[in-house]
Amino acid sequence: METSSSNFENEYVYIKLLDKLINRFILESKKFVEYAAFLYGTVDLGAYDYKSSKLVCDFEYFAFTKSTKTLISIRNLLKVNHNEDVYMLVRSIFENYLSCRYAQETENIDSFIFNPVNLALAYYNVQPDGKIFNREKIEVGQQENPSAFKTGLDKGYYTDFYDILSRYSHCNFGTIDCYTENNIFTIDKNSDPLLIRLFVVFVFSKIFELVVTVEGEDFPDSRTEKKCYQLVIESCEFQLKVMDYLNNIHQSNTDETLIYRNKRMKKLLKNMKRSLQEELGSVDKNLGKPSHGEL
């Protein structure tokens, strides 16, 4: 497919603005971890031997802190065009988000907190079929696949999205194009620089919205709270714009060998776009209107 110079110019601008969003998410997330993230439920458990609902918050803060550290690693990889490795880390953040949202909705603290801790300490053992047993040979749980955690509008894009992320996490020859140029192997190819940045912002904005922009969260002041809410809105609005741009690229692609891939990508982008309308925290979304502020 021939790409016009205007497309190259648009992609360059979009890439720079997505990089700017990544930087803003890192800045606000690092601050949030410092002023808000605390093991409230774990402290209650140690002091009062009481499993409170605050343990779900502990898991949320864990997933968010883990994702923030991963996002910093992603930024470093993007700087050297190691986009394929970024896909693997995006999958990690995506799984953090799915687990976090599912834990919120089910409050199953055994599956997300106590079973993993006991497995790490070898008090529990897991069988090949995923069943978890304690030292008395009593079944105490089941290891779940991330597909079991998808809820809401995440169900619409999950299969196609997770397939792409997993493709780069395994030794999959379907990614050969990222490592070759004119039938010669190379480690210098900058593959899909716009798409991968969209995926990064897409998954991180979801866990940020789910954990940070929630009514009653302990912000240090109203200005910080407003900045975080504004970041979610501006991020979602800009993602919609990039998704429309990429959809048009796939729509206009006349390469017959890519007909089915383009069709699948258009379906994925449509479902991702739809999911952005879903309110995960306390942000009042009214997407598709003019931007509330500059990126």
Image: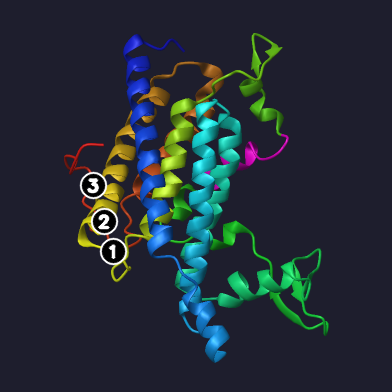
Q: Which residues are magenta?
A: 159-171
What's under tag 3, amino acid-wise? Answer: Leu
**Sequence-first disc among 3 and 2:** 2
The residue carrying mark 1 is 220
Q: Are marks 2 and 1 in contact (CB under 8 Å)?
A: yes
Q: Residue at x 67, y 73 (%)?
A: 115
Q: Please tell me whether mark 1 sits on a helix, a strand or a loop.
A: loop
Viewer-proximal residue among 188 and 240: 188
Task: Indicate left or right for 205 with 144 as reference.
Answer: left
Classify residue 127 by image quadrant.
bottom right
The colour scheme of the drawn protein is rainbow
Name the spot of residue 4 as percent of width and height, x first: 36, 10
Viewer-proximal residue among 179 and 50: 50
The residue carrying mark 3 is 287
Crowding at dot 2, Cα within 10 Å, few <14 / some 14-19 / many 20+, comes out as: some
Q: Residue at x 46, y 40 (%)?
A: 200
Residue 51 visible from this viewpoint: no
Q: Does 237 appear above or below 146?
A: above
The residue carrying mark 2 is 224
Q: Does 65 appear above or below 57?
A: above
Which one is in front in this view, the residue at disc 3 or the one at disc 2?
Answer: 2
Which one is in front in this view, the residue at disc 3 or the one at disc 1?
Answer: 1
Q: Does 62 appear above or below 135?
A: above
Residue 290 included in the magenta stretch of the image? no
